[in-house]
Amino acid sequence: MNFERVLITPEAERHARAQHLLAGWPDLPVEKVSGIPEVQDWLKRNYPDPIGQGKRTLLLDVYSGEFLKPCPCTQSHINCGYWILNPVLGCPFDCSYCVLQEYLGPSPITVRLNWEDMLSEVSDYLTNRRARSSLRSRSYFGGGGLDSCPDLPFRIGTGELSDSLALEPWLGLAPALINFFAGQEGAVFELKTKSDRVECLEGLDHQGKTVVSWSVNPEEMIAREEQGAATLEARLQAAKRVAGWGYKVGFHFDPILDEPGAGEAYEEVVNKIFATVAPEQVAWTSLGALRFNPRLAPIVRERFSNSRILLGEFITGLDGKLRYLRFIRQPLLRRISGAIRQAAPQAWLYLCMETESVCQEVLPLSVI
């Protein structure tokens, strides 16, 4: 986390949280801007790599829209029922495959300061959801665990448009969310990260309502495709620490990258995970093969000359995204899921953004 420029909107300047956060960057001048569009224009006009510069630019803002939204799922693909919470936009890590490069474009890392509005929105939604508890999302989960419970937990996470821990402990958002969800019924909160910054989670009374999850890949792929992120070993040691503090942990093999030797490499990752963390400490594991909007491809070519992600064999799916051919991704998904099943037979395991037919081939169990 190495910011070079700190920006603030007029609404954020009047917010009580602003001065507390700005104290973390005493040597950087604070500049006033009207909002994200002005910053995006400035990035595009002044830098050869506006996306990279955006990762070194911090914007404090106040948001008037909805913080909580359902995770987008392609029609004809299985929906896992996940909801995303967006108090932060953007990530300081620089992964070649990151869809935010195309989705957000050249943008600052934006922290929305009005957390009280966000928590009120979540609280109201959960209250209303409990009132209509007979409604359940259709989702697919292979294996034992939470899928066998009569009341499927409502999962909410912050790791979709940002990394949940990359700005900690400076931001202080993760502890605030953990404390909030500790008092909520019928919901499980997930922090999803590629970092090892877990110190702020120690000693919190999470009441078993928070899962801390890591995106994982083989070490060689991390070094090449996930610039600035923690090593696999550092992530696993962080998971071990967190599990020791009583949290359940999760692992997301997403995106799975197909390249020579990938099957063996991912099996090794599975073995390392369960040599570090006991199966009963793992809340869930997900698998998702690489998929991306075609508009991301020229960005990757320009920004990541050493990346290998565009060397795969792709088709255009029903959602317009490029994804590996089925005969490529399905055996890889089956091989990784088989390794997980062998190490943790009762693990809650599911596929992300896959068709029902692929789910049934890889995890031949029930559709909920």
Image (spheres, rainbow, N blue to C red):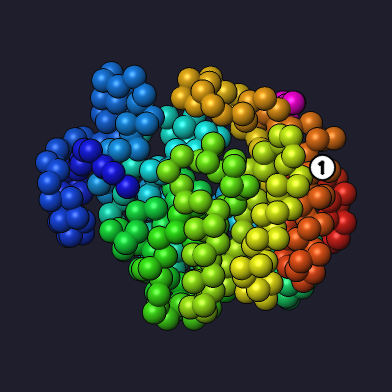
Q: The C terminus is located in which quarter?
A: bottom right
Instruction: Give the residue at x 26% y 42%.
Output: 3
**Residue 131 visible from this viewpoint:** no
Determine whether the residue tagged by mark 1 lies in a helix, strand or loop. helix
Instruction: Give the residue at x 25% y 46%.
Output: 60
Q: What amino acid type is highlighted by mark number 1?
A: Gln
Coordinates of residue 170 in the picture (x, y in percent): 28, 58
Q: Is residue 266 magenta?
A: no
Q: Quadrant of residue 4?
A: top left
Bounds of the magenta span? 313-317
**Residue 82 visible from this viewpoint:** yes
Residue 281 relative to residue 13: left or right: right
Where 242 falls versus 44 (above or below)? below
Where 254 falls versus 103 (above or below)? below
Q: Mark 1, residues whose alpha carbon is within 10 Å: few (<14), some, or many (≥20)?
A: some
Q: Which residue is mark 1?
A: 330
Q: Is residue 315 magenta?
A: yes
